[in-house]
Image (cartoon, rainbow, N blue to C red):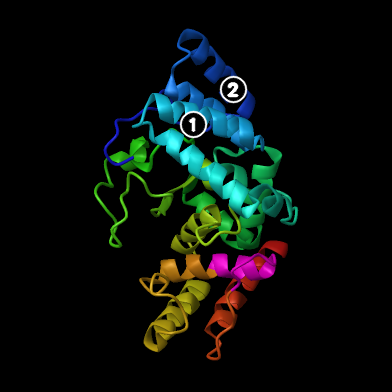
Amino acid sequence: MVSAPPIADGSNALEPVDVAVARADRMLSSDPRSAHALCLKGSALLRLGKLDAARERFEEAAALDGRCFAAFLGLGAVFDHERYGLLGAAGGLPVFPEPVELGAIVPDLPALTPLELRVVCASAAPLAGALPAVAAAGARIRLLPIDVRPTDVPELSGTISGRTEDHRSYDAIGGLAASRLAVARIDELLDVVSESGLVFAHELAHLAFFHLAGELRERVEALHREATELGWVAEAYALENPDEFFAVSYTDWLRQRYGLPLRREPDDEGIFDAIAAVFEALGRVARA
């Protein structure tokens, strides 16, 4: 992903699976050996839960073009589905109605499958009290198709390059967030159980924190300072800054709330319980 040329064409927007299948089939009718078309077809099949068929397309694409990063992303996603049972885990999430502002914040919402929408709503609903401010600021979170890297997005290509502070490449990163634009990968969306799962929820939480109102923001910043002084109550990544602390804590809290694996135990200092109270407060604002 770091060294390969761009492979996507068009708007870089996520397509509904039926549209993606039709486009891939047209491309394959013109060129049956198109690795790009095979990846688009594989991604659509993966999104429909047809793992064996998706694997076949990705394997064929990888054999045809060893530099087609989408083929290897797709194979990795298939392996994760098989290892973690992602379809069942995502299907076990509670069903939430769409928060009012979600369509404005997630422009790719109409392209999602019912299961993908379930994950997005379960990720967003507990933050609903923060979403009006995110929408009012014009902030968005994009779901990237399998053939699009963060650095291929025009709004990001001129502002990010090289590597993050923890040495991850912006070309290959699975999710990132700035104050007005966040991105997450569609091929990772259904992962709500692995150690690197809940990426969409994590990046949406960044946007929520960037536009969080005064009192709650001050409470999070104070908790981050206290956690940093203690050191052991959160992982080093979460302690990098207040917004990372908020986003990591949010996915930890979702794991606990939804009974997902890798749940974090409350600490004796009450830091986790205190940040959980912030998320509960956002939920109460939304219900009010």
Provide residue 131's location: percent of width, then percent of height.
Answer: 57, 56
* Front of the two marks 1 and 2: 1
Real-space Cα separation, disc 1 to disc 2, in angstroms: 17 Å
Instruction: Judge whether residue 35 is colored magenta.
Output: no
- 244 or 132: which is nearer to us? 244
Q: Do the residues labelled 1 and 2 touch (CB within 8 Å)?
A: no
SS under mark 2: helix
Residue 150 appears anywhere in the view = yes
Provide residue 66's location: percent of width, then percent of height.
Answer: 35, 31
| In the image: residue 84, left or right of residue 11 | right
Q: Earlier in the sequence, mark 1 or mark 2?
A: 2
- 10 or 215: which is nearer to us? 10
Tag 2: amino acid? Val
Instruction: Judge whether residue 258 is colored magenta.
Output: yes
The circle drawn on residue 200 is none
Please tell me which residue is depicted at 52% across the width and 33% down the height of the picture: 14
Provide residue 263's location: percent of width, then percent of height.
Answer: 61, 72
Please name the residue that numbered disc 2 is placed on.
21
| In the image: residue 111, left or right of residue 142 | right
Provide residue 114's location: percent of width, then percent of height.
Answer: 70, 40
Looking at the rendering, the stretch of residues picked out in magenta corresponds to: 250-263
Please name the residue that numbered disc 1 is placed on.
59
Quarter of the N terminus within the rendering? top left
Q: Which residue lies furthest to the top in this view?
A: 30
